Image (cartoon, grey):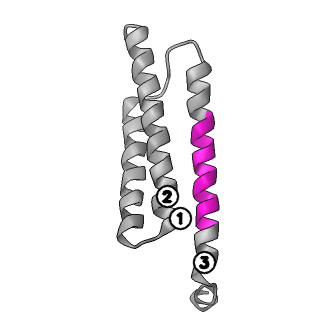
């Protein structure tokens, strides 16, 4: 199995990785927009929100360290979207006095 994987060019993995990371960012964008449009308090926990931010940060750093464009670029976008989602949830908590 590893021999088969080794035959696949690196640029193919970069393209597939960027598509996969972009898909994850799209899902996160949809969640952020949904959270903005929903007029009630968020049910997302801060542990969940900051946990995912940390995951994006670690994969971003991994991508920078190993110069993997698919990892650092999509995780940079993921961090930005996650930060926006955190800001929306914190704003809603303050607005709803929780």
Res. 13 image quadrant: bottom right
Residue at 36% over, 56% down: 58
Boundaries of the magenta span: 16-30
Residue 27 lies in magenta, yes or no? Answer: yes
Which residue: 60% across, 77% down?
A: 11
Q: Position of residue 86 (x, y in %)?
A: 42, 31
Find numbered disc 3 in the image and state the secondary structure of the residue it sits on: helix
Camera-nearest residue between 16 and 40: 16
- C-alpha span from label 1 to label 3: 10 Å
The Cα–Cα distance between marks 3 and 2, rounded to whole angstroms, is: 15 Å
Front position in the image: 67 or 57: 67
Identify the residue position indicated by label 2 in the image: 73
Please determine whether, in this image, residue 18 is positioned above or below residue 43: below
Q: Is residue 62 above or below residue 41?
A: below
Q: Is residue 15 above or below residue 46?
A: below
How far is mark 1 from mark 2, CA to CA?
Answer: 6 Å
Q: How many marks?
A: 3
> Residue at label 1?
70
Dot placed on the residue nearer the N-terminal end, 1 or 3: 3
Q: Label 3 crowding class (10 Å Cα cut-off): few <14, some 14-19, many 20+?
A: few
Q: Secondary structure at mark 2?
A: helix
- Earlier in the chain: of badge 3 and badge 2, it is 3
The x and y percentages for residue 62 are 38, 65
Residue 90 place in picture, x, y as percent: 39, 22
Q: In x, y percent, where is residue 49?
A: 42, 36
Q: Which residue is mark 3?
A: 11
Quadrant of the rendering where the N terminus is positioned: bottom right
Please indicate whether residue 81 sits to the left or right of residue 62 in the image. Answer: right
Query: What SS does tag 1 mark?
Result: helix
Tag 1 near tag 2, CB within 8 Å: yes
How crowded pointer 1 is (Cα within 10 Å; few <14, some 14-19, many 20+) is rated as many
Q: Disc 1, disc 3: CB below 8 Å?
A: no
């Amino acid at each position: 199995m590893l021999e088969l994987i080794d035959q696949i060019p690196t640029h193919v993995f970069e393209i597939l990785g960027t598509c996969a990371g972009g898909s994850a960012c799209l899902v996160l964008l949809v969640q952020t927009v949904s959270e903005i449009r929903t007029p009630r308090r968020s049910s997302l926990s801060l542990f969940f929100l900051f946990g995912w931010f940390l995951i994006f940060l670690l994969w971003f750093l991994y991508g920078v360290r190993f110069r993997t464009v698919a990892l650092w670029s999509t995780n940079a976008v993921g961090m930005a979207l996650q930060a926006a989602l955190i800001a929306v949830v914190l704003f809603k908590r303050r607005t709803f006095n929780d």
